[in-house]
Amino acid sequence: MRSFIAAASILFAAPAAAEHHEMTEGPHLTFDRVFASPDLNGESPRQARLSPDGRYLTLLRNRPDDTERYDLWGFDRQTGEWSMLVDSEALGTGAELSEEEKMQRERARIANLKGIISYQWASDGKSVLVPLDGDLYLARLDGEVVRLTDTEETELNATLSPTGENVAFVRSRQLWVAPVGGEARAITPLEESEDIRWGEAEFIAQEEMRRTDGFWWGPGDKRIVVERFDESGVETVTRAAIGADGTRVYTQRYPFAGSANAIVELYIMDPDGSDRVKIDLGDNADIYIPRVDWSSDGSAIYVHRQNREQTELDILRVDPATGASEVFFTETAALPDYWLNLGSDYRWLKDGSLIWWSERDGYGHLYHYVDGDWTQLTSGEWVVTGLVGVDQEAGRVFFTGTKDDVLAQQLYSLELADPSSIKLLTETDYVNSAMMDKDGQSLLIFRSNDNQPGQSYLADVEGNRIAWVMENALDSDHPYAPYLASHRPTQYGTIKAEDGTDLYWEMVTPEMEPGKKYPVIYHHYGGPGPQMVTKGWDGGLRQAIADMGYIWFALDNRGSANRGAVFEQPIYHAMGGVEVRDQKAGAEFLKTLDFVDPDKIALDGWSYGGYMTLKQLQADPGLYAAGIAGAPVSRWELYDTHWTERYMGTPQGNPDGYAKSSAIPDATKISDPLLVIHGMADDNVVLDHTTELVAAMQRENVPFQMMLYPGFGHRVAGEKISPHVQNAKFRFLKHHGVTPPE
């Protein structure tokens, strides 16, 4: 195959040649230290939120001596003081979580976290609902904490009502409602079949649609929408959660590509379960329900109905009294051979109009829908990455996007009356994200860059900093301070794909000596969705790899996010093709650099990245020195419906595409060293992917190595486990001679 590499376009100081550096003083990073406490990133808060009145900022803060345990903290903007609102260790019971909650956490990739993982402000801004160890608590700002439930069962997905007077939650497959501090009662029936659940999001919604909600309160607590799903028609997989202290076997409903999904229905009822009516979702039950919203005045419910092919999205307007529905508008895929990217970047306004994100012109942009007419608010060959907030009184919209730099999103605002004038509100030296209070009056901005761990600050609507929330300065007290002397800069550039498209890469090199050549850890994901190459802080792992004498490298191939529909489209019905060729272009570029050892480029990827490792080794034997495949998909018929069919269609409708994309037929052609890693309780990329792969290789006496992690799901992580994973990788590389120069 001819090379498609053009001359590299350098964005920052790229390593055109190795330069001699004085060796830095101070300790080098180890994997043990990267994942130990205190966190090298400094504080790593989660779920920062502003109170309804904007006075308080709350967040979940992990402990200096235990990075995986989170407590609830609050910042009073009037006094400028922080206080711990709920001490998870003092309040918690340590009770074991239900299997349902464990799986929800696994699907949110937070299975390793402890303490408080979620919370919700009451509408009056005077208290916060806190789930902890399977029960519910109400934390008041004066320090009082009231226990709301004390049961053996787990209360899932607890939500305060709009008035704050009631709380709803799922327990034992039913939806329960209670006055805050009062006795709860089930408002949905207990179905005879355990495959039927009320008030929960089905597996596909949780795993692939970023929806964990299964019920939605209406304004004034008057009505509530409740999901009922029946997964009795969904295929089963026996999942053995093999742990160090024994094995538990679960029969799990898993919708394999091309097979039946759960049947989802929506009902509207009063908070006591009475006056229940079914929402008309249409005659076709083979659909997805990604989002459900109430209008601000409670006069309508808006249900997003997506077709199985994921090329159309109907917004249904539903009558809360009768359940009758009509199509309000329909969104369609931007290209003939393309799909709809789901998101939550929309906002219903008080006047009944809608701010809506769409790729209809080929790039993700914002639109204003008023009385049946669309006005495009943003445009150009860049994408809006998030709708942050709307100040409805001032007619001002706040959003993040890549207008100034595809590798560093910024925060912007525009006026609905004159959207052509977009105002930049953040510093372009950083990658920025933000959130706002519900009225669009206060900003909480998060930022980082390659040399600065995450920071956050409160700002006014012009982006001016009012106060640091977390300055996280790299001073002498920062956990990363001892390693600053050996911190290596990140370098960026582009190469050309076979069709001339720019592909962005980033690289971290060790301190190099003239004349020596260095091995490369070629990190990749490759699949649709994530953008891997950005200018944000990436933690200590790549620095530890550089400290060991390796080059760390990553490249975003066609199919990845934030470059527009045409950039993503080439993988449609053909995964495992263009991504492999683009990543090969990256490897060939690396081989042109005089400080890279061309015989020591090792692949490292997880999930889709693990799949890519397999496909790259199969496509180009000898190009790579070795490959590491973590939790790899091996055959797309074994992965779930919503994610797989979005890009590949069904196995029945695209048999050739599935056959070509499979990593099983050519598994025996892998001649380069391979390490396969998998969590043995993975319910996302189930262990069957790896067992089918290794069985095929064993039958033909093809050598490989494998590391399994009992009890771990798709995310194999923890203070001790994470270093074990990394050490296993580098022992494997050392065994096969992929080592730094002497």
Image (spheres, rainbow, N blue to C red):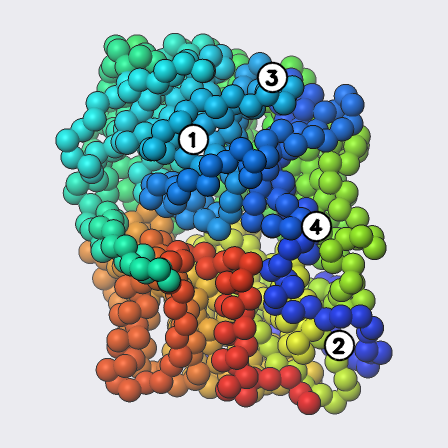
Image disc number at residue 511: 2
Give the residue drawn at x 51%, y 44%.
114
Q: Whole-Å distance between the Cαs marked 2 and 4? A: 25 Å
**Picture coordinates of residue 306 (x, y %)?**
33, 36
Give the residue drawn at x 67%, y 17%.
394
Q: Which amino acid does label 2 sit on?
A: Glu
Q: In which quarter of the image is the N terminus?
A: bottom left
**Picture coordinates of residue 443 (x, y %)?**
69, 30
Give the residue drawn at x 47%, y 31%.
131
Give the residue drawn at x 71%, y 64%.
490
Q: What residue type is labelled 1?
A: Asp
Q: In this view, does 545 lie to the left or right of 157?
A: right
Image disc number at residue 697: none
Q: In which quarter of the image is the C terminus?
A: bottom right
Q: Is residue 5 left or right of residue 443?
A: left
Give the label, 2 or 4, closer to the camera. Answer: 4
Q: Dot 4 surroundings within 10 Å: few (below 14), some, or many (20 or more)? A: many
